[in-house]
Amino acid sequence: MKIIAVNIRKTHEKKGPKKATEEAWKLNEDKFRENRPEFVIGVASGKIHGYYKFQNFLPDIKSKRLIFSLTECDSLEIDKIDSFTNGKNLKYFVIKHKWEIK
């Protein structure tokens, strides 16, 4: 299982965690295609504010971002993600070292 954490600190209160997570991430499209995640979490100030299953993405030429299409995770998936991230405090979580859950 692959997971990616998106920093939504600046926008989650205005837009809500799902919308902020869908629009927040600037990525190299080719690298992203190689490492497509199964799950995306929206993180602000070290805390997870949204758990989502990755559906698809669209490049946004104007903002140079990838826009995600996401659906809410169920409780079992949330438990798996929380177990992997040692709870909800991700202040020092480094996603590149924990990209893949086995």
Image (tube, grey):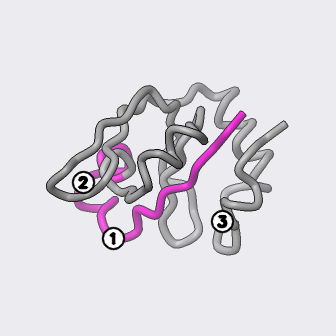
Neighbour tally class for label 2: few under 14, some 14-19, many 20 plus, Cα within 10 Å: few
For the view shown, which residue lies furthest in the left direction? 62
Q: Secondary structure at mark 3?
A: loop
Identity, as a three-letter code, of the amino acid under mark 3: Leu
For mark 1, give the secondary structure: loop
Q: Quadrant of residue 90?
A: bottom right
Q: Amino acid at mark 1?
A: Lys
Left or right: where does residue 31 sit relative to residue 78? left
Which region shows up in magenta? 1-20
Q: Nearer the viewer, residue 68 or 62?
A: 62
**Structural distance between the alpha carbons of marks 2 and 3:** 21 Å
Task: Tell me which amino acid carries mark 2.
Answer: Lys
Q: Give the alpha-carbon distance from disc 2 to disc 1, as whole Å.
A: 10 Å
Residue ID for mark 3: 90
Q: Position of residue 40 (x, y in %)?
A: 53, 43
Q: Which residue is mark 2?
A: 15
